[in-house]
């Protein structure tokens, strides 16, 4: 069993920003993640296929906007090499100016390199699914289930942070905890994502003009597309037969098809892609029924926070992280500090803001304890 000052559940952008900041400040932190690796919505996938070798792409955010100086400074530190390096170090690529002066950044190689960099030096346990938690005698206890389904205590800590989607945080909270009511109305949309490996012959026949930037589409099915294999530092696909095109579905379209099987989703998104992609006049040798070489489809059950997701979860009471009642807090992109900022940047700002609040709390506690001892 682990004993520590702070347990952070969730190793996405928000959770690891928090854990990294606290760890660097000397706080004993344990970060717990149910998946096999870090990333959350910055997760990347290396898919070993039988016919085309290893295909690598971002399952989550392929790019993100940067609006605040705080987030830009954080990325500058990572990009300068002054941050602790990992095997696949993050490098930023500024693609274009976006709406309202925000800059679009594309991580080189893989988006998950950002969270892997943040995780370096953090005590991290992946592949651990916390089943429930309890507040007892001034400490937070977390539990996992053994092979027979019986609860086994996993950790004990003074503070506990839920850096997971609000639906998951709601499920983990003890019965009748006051946060339950706050989080009950904070919802996130699901999203289907399909990655298509498309041969050069099909690309030429369709006459698509491809760029690595995110391409917003006015489609009922598709929210945006990106070409994974054209981004800086990408070496996949190695066989050179074509390009990897990622299609992110519209949240509402995804919500209406949450229980569809993956092949049906891929077929629908491919058809929509062929209808919606910009065409530059067609290829020299038209193909009657163009199809991808292969495809990989993934469902994000908790993906994009609904508009005003926190209207009922603390914002009206100006509680940026709800509060620290019973030494418990939440963080994530749905707790947007600035209403106009979303996604990766919102997650970073939430994690860094909570870290500052916790460090202030720790300093006050230490100061009080020191005064009492004197």
Image (spheres, rainbow, N blue to C red):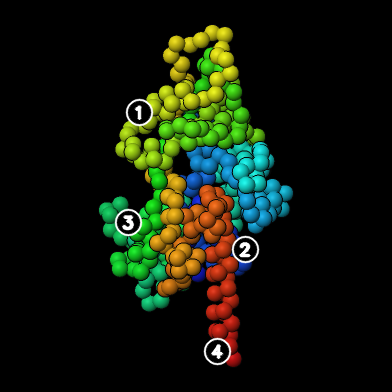
Look at the numbered disc 3 and give the secondary structure of its residue: strand
Q: Which residue is mark 4?
A: 372
Residue furthest to the bottom in view is: 374
Q: Which residue is mark 3?
A: 145
- Report the Cα–Cα distance between label 4 and label 2: 27 Å
- Report the Cα–Cα distance between label 1 and label 4: 66 Å
Residue 329 seen in render:
no
Q: Which residue is mark 1?
A: 264
Q: Residue 23 appears in which quarter of the rendering?
A: bottom right
In the rendered structure, which disc, 3 or 1, sits on the residue that comes first in sequence? Answer: 3
Residue furthest to the top in view is: 285
In the rendered structure, which disc, 2 or 1, sits on the residue that comes first in sequence? Answer: 2
Residue at (54, 27) in percent of width and height: 244
Observer-nearest residue: 33 or 59? Answer: 59
Question: Where 218 falls versus 280 (above or below)?
Answer: below
Residue at (58, 44) in percent of width and height: 64
Question: Where 293 falls versus 82 (above or below)?
Answer: above
The image shows residue 319 at horizontal and vertical percentages of: 48, 68
Left or right of 87? Residue 178 is left
Look at the numbered disc 2 and give the secondary structure of its residue: helix
Quick one: label 2, few (<14), some, or many (20+) residues within 10 Å?
A: few
Question: Where 120 falls versus 62 (above or below)?
Answer: below
In the rendered structure, which disc, 1 or 4, sits on the residue that comes first in sequence? Answer: 1
Q: Residue 308 appears in which quarter of the rendering?
A: bottom left
Q: Quadrant of the C terminus?
A: bottom right
Label for residue 24? Answer: 2
- Report the Cα–Cα distance between label 3 and label 4: 41 Å
- Report the Cα–Cα distance between label 3 and label 1: 34 Å
């Amino acid at each position: 069993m682990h004993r520590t000052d702070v347990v952070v559940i969730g190793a996405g952008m928000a959770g690891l920003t928090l854990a990294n900041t606290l760890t660097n400040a000397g706080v004993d932190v344990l970060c717990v993640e149910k998946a096999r690796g870090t990333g959350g919505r910055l997760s990347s996938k290396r898919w070993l296929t039988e016919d085309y070798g290893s295909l690598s792409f971002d399952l989550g955010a392929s790019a993100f906007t940067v609006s605040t100086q705080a987030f830009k400074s954080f990325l500058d530190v990572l990009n300068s090499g002054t941050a602790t390096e990992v095997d696949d170090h993050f490098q930023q690529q500024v693609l274009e100016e976006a709406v309202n002066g925000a800059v679009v950044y594309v991580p080189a190689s893989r988006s998950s390199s950002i969270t892997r960099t943040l995780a370096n030096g953090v005590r991290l346990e992946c592949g651990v699914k916390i089943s429930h938690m309890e507040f007892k005698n001034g400490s937070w206890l977390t539990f996992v289930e053994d092979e027979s389904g019986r609860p086994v205590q996993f950790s004990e800590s003074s503070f506990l942070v839920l850096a997971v989607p609000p639906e998951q945080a709601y499920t983990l909270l003890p019965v009748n905890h006051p946060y339950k009511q706050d989080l009950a109305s904070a919802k996130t949309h699901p999203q289907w994502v399909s990655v298509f490996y498309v041969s050069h012959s099909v690309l030429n026949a369709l006459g698509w003009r491809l760029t690595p930037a995110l391409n917003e589409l006015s489609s009922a099915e598709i929210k945006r597309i990106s070409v994974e294999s054209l981004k800086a530092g990408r070496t996949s696909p190695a066989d050179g037969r074509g390009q990897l095109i990622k299609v992110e579905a519209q949240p509402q379209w995804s919500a209406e098809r949450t229980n569809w099987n993956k092949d049906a989703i891929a077929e629908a998104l491919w058809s929509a892609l062929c209808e919606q992609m910009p065409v530059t006049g067609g290829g020299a040798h038209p193909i009657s029924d163009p199809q991808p070489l292969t495809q990989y489809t993934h469902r994000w059950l908790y993906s994009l926070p609904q508009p005003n997701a926190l209207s009922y979860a603390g914002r009206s009471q100006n509680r940026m992280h709800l509060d620290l009642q019973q030494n418990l807090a939440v963080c994530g992109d749905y707790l947007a500090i600035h209403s106009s900022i979303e996604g990766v940047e919102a997650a970073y700002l939430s994690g860094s803001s909570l870290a500052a609040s916790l460090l202030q709390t720790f300093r006050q506690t230490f100061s009080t304890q020191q005064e009492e001892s004197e």
